[in-house]
Image (cartoon, rainbow, N blue to C red):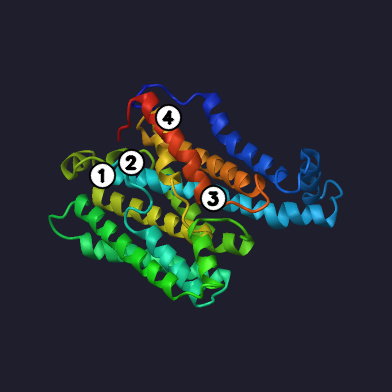
Amino acid sequence: MYMDNKTNRTFSTKTIVILIIAPVLAMTVSLCLGRLIIPPAIILKSFLAKLGLSEGSSAQIETVIWGIRFPRILIAALVGAGLSLAGLAFQGIFSNPLATPDTLGVASGSSFGAVLGILLDFGLTGIQLIAMFFGLLAVFLTWVTGHGKNRGTTVMVLSGIMMGSLFNALISLVRYLANTETQLPAITYWLMGSLSGRGYSTLAIGSPLIITGCVILFLLRWRLNILPLNNDEAKASGTNIRALRAITILCAVGMTASCVSMCGQVGWVGLLVPHMCRMRFGNNHMKLVPTCISTGMTFVIIVDTIARSMATTEIPISILTAIIGAPYFIYLVRKNGGWSI
């Protein structure tokens, strides 16, 4: 059981069950929906066939379920969990309710790497790898610029903003140099965020850092409550606050770079989901970490399902996260009278 320092109540069994079932249910519904509607009975039959307990469906149905939709749904789940947890981590580290996964410039750096890969006509795997490299490079440059004696988190945030602006300018330069008939449309579409065409190879490259980061932060979740404290208060608790912050930043940066490398920039998830969870469960990271993982997975799976199902042409996922997220975020803020860290 996890204690909540806002309500002083424990996680109920009902809440735990909901947190587990919600993403699983979203995955199941997402497998059924799309331009080709597949009944749940066919999904179950196909799943049993994978276990050798039943005969499978037609080759077309099997390809749609396991070759196209299933890897895409797994990527959506990982992106939702990774961005939500990264946003939560950055908000705790910098004690800033507006902190997002791009606070240190990682998303801008990854986006520049991806558009550079498109300009150089790399394949999807090459684009993903170079995007991850430049995302990590952007954070390294931010750390070199903002780290030093007597420099606090404010300087680090300002360095991240500066680095993000630099890489956004480089993105504009690449778009200016790109072929207007072939490369520029691909770059524009990629920057809006999409899971279209992503498969198991994309998952294999991007999932390790996201899964590793989620596991580490989940194991450290009780210590994450110490992040907003100053150095003296943290030392009094017996925690090496510098090591904790370094581990948390590395996990958040790795997850963000992997997410952006897989599907482009997906806005609002890292800002909206942590606050949704805070307004329901309080500020205790013992609760916030698992609820952010579950809620983030469910949210992105639902949004991606809508993106590929509601129109004949797929809608970029960032458009929907903004359309859905902004009004709902305003509603939550108005209903709860604000937010806190």
Q: Which mark is residue 317?
A: 3
Q: Are marks 1 and 2 in contact (CB under 8 Å)?
A: yes
Task: Give the amino acid at mark 2.
Answer: Arg
Looking at this rendering, what residue extends furthest in the left direction? 150
**Residue lying at 34% horizontally and 59% vertically, measured from the top left:** 105
**CA gap, disc 3 and disc 2:** 33 Å
Q: Secondary structure at mark 4?
A: helix
Position in image of residue 162 (x %, y %): 26, 60
**CA gap, disc 3 and disc 1:** 40 Å
Q: Who comes first in sequence, dot 3 or dot 1?
A: 1
Task: Give the amino acid at mark 1.
Answer: Thr
Quarter holding the N terminus is: top left
Residue receiving disc 2: 223
Q: Who comes first in sequence, dot 1 or dot 2?
A: 2
**Residue lying at 59% horizontally and 41% vertically, measured from the top left:** 302
- Name which quarter of the figure residue 29 lies in: top right
**CA gap, disc 1 and disc 2:** 8 Å
Instruction: Count neighbours of disc 3 (C-alpha within 10 A) and say few if under 14, some if 14 to 19, many if 20 or more.
Output: many
Residue receiving disc 4: 331
Q: Which mark is nearer the camera, 3 or 2?
A: 3
Q: Are marks 4 and 3 in contact (CB under 8 Å)?
A: no
Q: Is residue 332 above or below residue 153?
A: above
Task: Give the amino acid at mark 3.
Answer: Ile
Residue receiving disc 1: 239
Residue 281 visible to an observer of this rendering: no
Indicate left or right for 35 with 232 as reference.
right
Q: Secondary structure at mark 3?
A: helix
**CA gap, disc 4 and disc 3:** 21 Å
